[in-house]
Image (cartoon, rainbow, N blue to C red):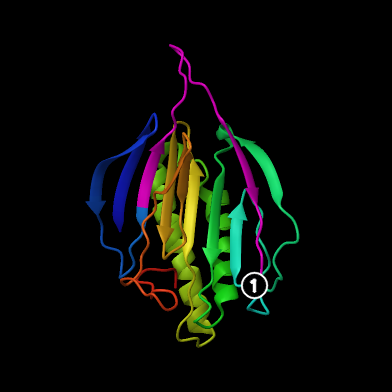
């Protein structure tokens, strides 16, 4: 697994270090964002996360092949998306995790792959939530392994040759925000009127007609 650590210092993202670990044939990029907080001597100031999410089926497909996991919420495997925008606020001390999954429409059972990833993400969070405080990188690495295994096991049990989903995740620690992605689901950063991508697309070159093939995904 390729691990990239990024630290936010004021409004700049600075690469700190890069390590490489072997994990089958899949690669996931892990990065860290340093939460810039005002600290007083002797104690840490907690922060809050305001969030909003929705999931739309689009205008092409008859079924929704996307899913998410946001503070315990996700969609059933067979769904028509959401008709509204859901929002909320969580304290950093709750160690929230948020993720999106884009089932691969060109493969079999994209909606099931996205659902299994979301479900597995939730199970891992319930079992290993406190690890975010101690080692957020390892939490995300293990989450990717478990989500990947869940999709692969379903494919094997149901004799499906190829099924998969992309993933993009954020885990909020005490003074660090950890993120990872597989495929072309992206994570962006908005700061000081600037909006830029901080994740890395796992695609094979650039294709002007249609989407470029993915080189990394869950499944």
User: In the picture, residue 113 is in which quadrant?
Assistant: bottom right
User: Magenta span has 42?
Assistant: yes
Magenta part mainly helix, strand or loop? loop
Magenta stretch bounds: 30-57
> Which quarter of the figure is the N terminus placed in?
bottom left
Q: Residue at x 30, y 64 (%)?
A: 23
Q: Residue at x 48, y 41 (%)?
A: 190
Give the residue at the far right of this rendering. Answer: 83
Q: Residue at x 48, y 20 (%)?
A: 44
Front-lying residue, 38 or 119? 38
User: In the picture, residue 204 is in which quadrant?
Assistant: bottom left
- Mark 1: few, some, or many residues within 10 Å (few <14, many ≥20)? many
Front-lying residue, 167 or 24? 167
Q: Is residue 117 left or right of residue 199?
A: right
User: Magenta span has 81?
Assistant: no
Residue matched to label 1: 64
Q: Is residue 204 visible?
A: yes
- Assign a secondary structure to mark 1: loop
Q: Is residue 6 above or below residue 202?
A: above
Count all numbered tags in the image, as a single digit. Answer: 1
The image position of residue 134, as x and y in percent, is 42, 37
Q: Is residue 116 above or below residue 86?
A: below
> Which quarter of the figure is the C terminus placed in?
bottom left
Q: Is residue 80 above or below residue 86?
A: below
The image position of residue 142, as x and y in percent, is 42, 56
């Amino acid at each position: 697994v390729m691990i990239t650590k990024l630290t936010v210092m004021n409004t700049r993202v600075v690469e700190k270090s890069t390590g490489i670990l072997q994990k089958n044939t899949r690669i996931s990029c892990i990065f860290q964002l340093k939460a810039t907080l005002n600290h007083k001597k002797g104690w840490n100031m907690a922060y809050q996360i305001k969030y909003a999410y929705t999931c739309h089926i689009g205008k092409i497909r008859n079924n929704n092949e996307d899913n998410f996991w946001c503070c315990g919420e996700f969609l059933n495997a067979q769904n028509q998306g959401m008709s509204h925008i859901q929002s909320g606020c969580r304290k950093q001390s709750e160690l929230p995790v948020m993720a999106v999954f884009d089932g691969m429409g060109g493969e079999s059972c994209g909606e099931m792959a996205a659902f299994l990833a979301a479900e597995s993400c939730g199970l891992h969070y319930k079992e290993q939530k406190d690890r975010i405080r101690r080692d957020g990188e390892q939490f995300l690495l293990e989450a990717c392994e478990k989500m990947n295994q869940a999709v692969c096991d379903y494919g094997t049990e149901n004799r499906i040759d190829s099924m998969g989903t992309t993933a993009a995740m954020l885990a909020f620690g005490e003074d660090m925000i950890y993120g990872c992605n597989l495929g072309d689901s992206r994570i962006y950063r908005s700061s000081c009127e600037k909006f830029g991508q901080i994740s890395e697309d796992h695609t094979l070159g650039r294709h002007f007609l249609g989407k470029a093939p993915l080189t990394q995904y869950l499944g």
